[in-house]
Amino acid sequence: MKSSQILVVDDEEFFLKLMFQTLRKEGGLVRTAQSGEEAAHWLRREVFDLAIVDIRMERTDGFEILEEVKRLYPQMKVIMVTGFPSPDTQALCIQKGADGYLVKPIEINELKKAIQSVLN
């Protein structure tokens, strides 16, 4: 994970801060976005190795972000995150090209393992 460029997209400020601090400690170069518009801003300005995207947000559907990332940067890895898990949601993530799927609350070791798995 060291020196990987990571974009975290979630409308919950607390989750963004937690992810930012955790990933920075691991050596990642992290940007955060609270909306699809903010995510699009970062995607136009920087190249990322990984995006961690919440599925259910107030103004943005995480699947829209996933589809846009895969359209613009097919090589970019995406881990989808949800607090409302279901087998259908997980299957849809995989169908739309997600590289990983995590359920909130996320354990730090689970997060590290998922990131290592998709980046290696």
Image (spheres, rainbow, N blue to C red):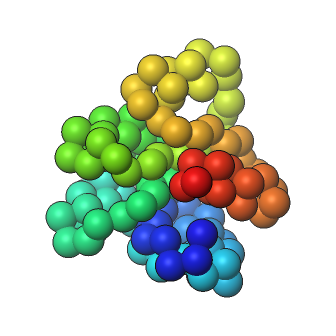
User: x%, y% of residue 64?
Assistant: 32, 37
> Which residue occupies the foreground of this view, 1 or 30?
1
User: Which image quarter is the N terminus in?
Assistant: bottom right
Residue 9 visible? The answer is: no
Q: Going 48% across and 36% down the picture, which residue do you hit? A: 98
Check the picture and name the quadrant holding the C terminus: bottom right
43 lies left or right of 108:
left
Residue 47 image offset from top left, x and y in percent: 29, 66
Q: Quadrant of residue 44?
A: bottom left
- Near-viewer residue (60 or 8): 8
- Please determine whether, in this image, residue 10 is positioned above or below residue 65: below
Question: Residue 28's x, y, as percent?
Answer: 55, 77
Q: Quadrant of residue 2?
A: bottom right
Q: Please, is residue 60 above or below residue 43 in the view?
A: above
Residue 78, horizontal then vertical, whole percent: 47, 46
- What residue is shown at x 67% (from left), y 43% (from top)? 102
Q: Residue furthest top?
A: 88
Image vertical order of residue 47 relative to residue 105, above or below: below
What residue appears at the point 50 percent right and 79 percent down from the top-left corner?
A: 3
